Image (cartoon, helix red, strand yellow):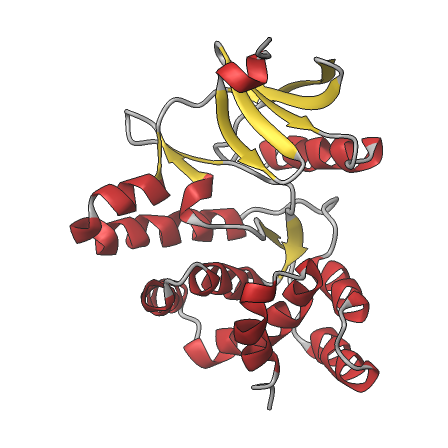
Amino acid sequence: MKTIQDINAIAERKSKIIYRDGDKVYKSFDETYSKSSILNESLNQARIEETGLNIPKITEVAIVDGKRAIVMEYIEGTTLEKMMRQNPEKIDEYLDLFVKIQLDIHSRRCPLLTKFKDKMTDKIFKSDLDASTRYDLAMRWREMPDHNSVLHCDFNPSNVIITPDGVPYIIDWSHASQGNASADVAKTYLIFELEGKKDIAEIYLKKFCKAKGTSEGYVRKWIPLIAAAQLIKGKAENREILMNHVNSVE
């Protein structure tokens, strides 16, 4: 017998499924997710909600069909990723909007969020790089300017929903942190590149730096550090690209 997850599934990820029931969305986790990690994710999203950004509001954390789930508002609309795919001739316009939304995120403050620098240095130390390289990269992280902007840390067009009225909503705040905005930009650049969209990554970077008034060279200094932290995910198909960035550290 099919469950509601099977009937109304919106997306499936490793160890979790997202499905809709009426005006609610359920993000359901399997047993590999601890109670604390699920509660921490919901707390992150609740804190971001308090910044005033347009995000789905959490209504509860519950047990549904025997699994823990975060329950939130359903936002009617189309992802920016789908819009880019369907209207490639408008990619320039969509990237301008994408950058504008990210700048708005970075303008917010949320002092209770985890420091991004702490999370990334911890990941570097847990990577399979040799001890000397891990130490050098972690120390380089420590030396980088430490700001307190809200960072999405997984900001990509699939996490932006545009409503029928043209209002953007940002979803999936599981990795939200606070720190230097350029680190968040470096992470988004890598997301594009790892998806095989290096050309879009370059256009995005130029647009962001122009809008922010930040030099491309400065943002590029963050890319090897983000790449090193990404190695812990262990995706073999991404390793060559990530290592090329890690090895480019001056």
Q: Indicate whether 39 appears above or below 145.
A: above
Picture quadrant of residue 136: bottom right
Q: Residue at left 32%, top 68%?
A: 199
Q: Indicate whether 109 appears above or below 141.
A: above
Q: Residue at left 52%, top 66%?
A: 186
Instruction: Looking at the picture, tell me which residue is in the foreground, 201 or 151.
Output: 201
On the rendered structure, is 191 left or right of 132? left
The residue furthest front is 1
On the rendered structure, is 58 left or right of 117? left
The residue furthest bottom is 250
Q: Residue at left 75%, top 74%?
A: 142
Picture quadrant of residue 43: top right
Picture quadrant of residue 77: top left
Residue 153's spot in the image, x, y percent?
58, 53
Q: Quadrant of the C terminus?
A: bottom right
Instruction: Looking at the picture, tell me which residue is in the foreground, 100 or 36.
Output: 36
Can residue 222 be seen in this snapshot? no
Q: Indicate whether 64 appears above or below 79.
A: above
On the rendered structure, is 172 left or right of 128? left
